[in-house]
Amino acid sequence: MGIFSNFFDRFKSSDFDIEPNQKVKTVQADFKNNFGLTLRVYKGKMFADPESTFAQLNKRTSKAVNWNADDLKIRANMTIKQVEDLVSDQFGLTIQVANEYDTYCVGNHYTLGQASRKEDLEDWCKKEGFKGSEDYLKSHGAKDWDEYYANRKK
């Protein structure tokens, strides 16, 4: 973590194209594969149907979706707010970026790269009085975040 990670985030990029015939769940899966994070897509104030295509969302929303906009180019060094604003401005869609387990939204000031590396979670653990995420996990009897979230579902 730190300056080198943030530097390399500038070069780690993915073109993130949304085509009208793509299903919401396909775009979400591509986003998770590229960044390791969850993309929440909304139709109005409700989650968009993952089986709907973006063209279908356009027909069902009062806010127009602009399919003639330039391709979205999302880089790991962009903040969550920049990504959310870009999608809203170019496509008229509301999104939020959540952690990989979709249990919380990542703070707007973090970059995608920082969130991918769980730096937001490290900061939260420290604010809660732990040395870091390893200390937090140990206090909950888990060796990693997968085990932690699996135990919470029980």
Image (cartoon, rainbow, N blue to C red):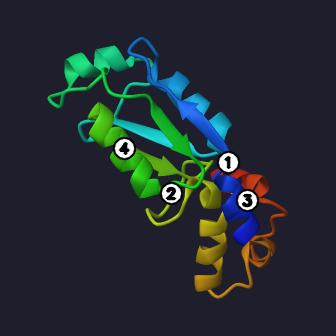
Residue 102 x %, y %: 55, 48
In the picture, measured across the screen, residue 61 lies left or right of residue 42, that is left
- Tag 1: amino acid: Phe
Q: Quadrant of residue 93?
A: top left
Nearer the camera: disc 1 or disc 4: 1
Mark earlier in primary sequence (4, 2): 4
* Quadrant position of the N terminus in the picture: bottom right
Mark earlier in primary sequence (2, 3): 2
Location of mark 4 (residue) = 86
Q: Residue furthest top?
A: 21
Neighbours of disc 4 within 10 Å: few (<14), some (14-19), many (20+): some
- The CA span between labels 3 and 1 is 32 Å
**Which residue is painted at 36% across and 20% down in the image?**
54
- Tag 4: amino acid: Leu
Location of mark 3 (residue) = 148
* Element type at mark 3: helix
In the rendered structure, find residue 82 and report the number of the disc placed on it: none
Mark earlier in primary sequence (3, 1): 1
Q: Residue furthest right?
A: 143
* Element type at mark 2: loop
Location of mark 1 (residue) = 11
Nearer the camera: disc 4 or disc 2: 4
Location of mark 2 (residue) = 104
Neighbours of disc 3 within 10 Å: few (<14), some (14-19), many (20+): some
